[in-house]
Image (tube, rainbow, N blue to C red):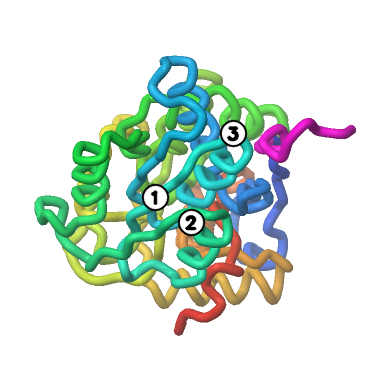
Amino acid sequence: MIHSSVLETIGNTPLVELGQVTKECHARVIAKLEYLNPGGSVKDRIGLAMVLAAEQAGEISRGDTIVEATAGNTGVALAMVAAVRGYHCVFVMPEKMSGAKAALLEAYGAEVIRTPDAPPSSPKNFRQVARRLAREKNWFLPDQFSHASNPQVHYDTTGPEIWRDAQGQVDALVVGVGTGGTLTGAGRYLKEQDPNRQGSVADPIGSTLGGGRDGPYRIEGIGGSEHPDNYDSNLVDEIYYVSDEDAFSCCHRLASEEGLLVGGASGCGAVAAMRWASKPSNQGKTAVVIFQDTGRNYLTLPT
């Protein structure tokens, strides 16, 4: 098959069973490899969905500027979409995020503004800076944290793909929450297919999103101190708190034992999924964990 553009290759990522790192578990753990999307992450889905929605609503036209607050992956997705559809991009990214991500955004022709790690109420917070730029310069701000297309595209694509490829054998969906879109969209779809299916959140220790204590952490792209509009906590049955050390250690195991090079958010999700699978009460069941992005963006970071 020949595609008319790279955007047509987004989605339909594979499910792969984690057979080595789960040998001591009672349940199966299957990973959905979202990092195999063309832009390298799960965010490709929402990048395309938000731009298409804006075009259909007449909010943007070719040559306009898109500004977004991003930990990196949504920026890459938007930059890829913008390159194909004719937009300029400016991204606001916290300084704690990988420099490799910033370089990747610039490789797509985007401008990157780095901000200090600041609380949501601070004018220096990356989301606040993006909002200010959108107002002052009349740029288009998708705002992945509240845009309805974010959970909707996961309801329309990610959830059905999981259900189809797992042949309906899904007892739990394990997701690290950044914007909440994957959990809310895919989780809602799967819950509609099977009301008994559990939704589990993998949250970094230091994030307050799941109710934990505020503190520093190095896992990128998930957690935080602000409850996103797209996060439906009613779909959450369990929250697993994962340390940086455990997440990064799991990343090393996934690479060396499963051949899967993933980022810290995926390692965090894998730890949570294995904790779920280690419960005797889940004997014979199946958990699906979302592997959000590739580990190639983090190879220069200390672990």
* Mark seen at residue 90: 1
Please check the rendered image and state whether residue 8 is part of the magenta-colored stretch, yes or no.
yes
| Residues rendered magenta in the picture | 1-11
Looking at this view, is 20 or 114 the one in front?
Answer: 114
Where does label 2 land, which residue?
Answer: 269
CB under 8 Å between discs 1 and 3: no
Q: Quadrant for residue 250, please give it.
A: bottom right
Say if residue 29 shows up in the picture: no
Among all residues in the image, which is located at the extreme top?
57
**Can you say whether 255 is above or below 220 in the image?**
below
Give percent across and percent down for residue 273.
51, 54
Residue mark closest to the camera, 2 vs 3: 3
| Residue located at (33% from left, 60% from top) | 113
Residue type for callout 3: Arg
Residue type for callout 2: Gly
* Sooner in the amino-acid sequence: mark 1 or mark 2: 1
Where does label 3 land, which residue?
Answer: 85
**Magenta span dominant secondary structure:** loop
Please check the rendered image and state whether residue 10 is part of the magenta-colored stretch, yes or no.
yes
**Can you say whether 131 is above or below 265 in the image?**
above
| Residue located at (48% from left, 16% from top) | 56
Image quarter of the N terminus: top right
Say if residue 214 shows up in the picture: yes
Helix, strand or loop at label 3? It is: helix
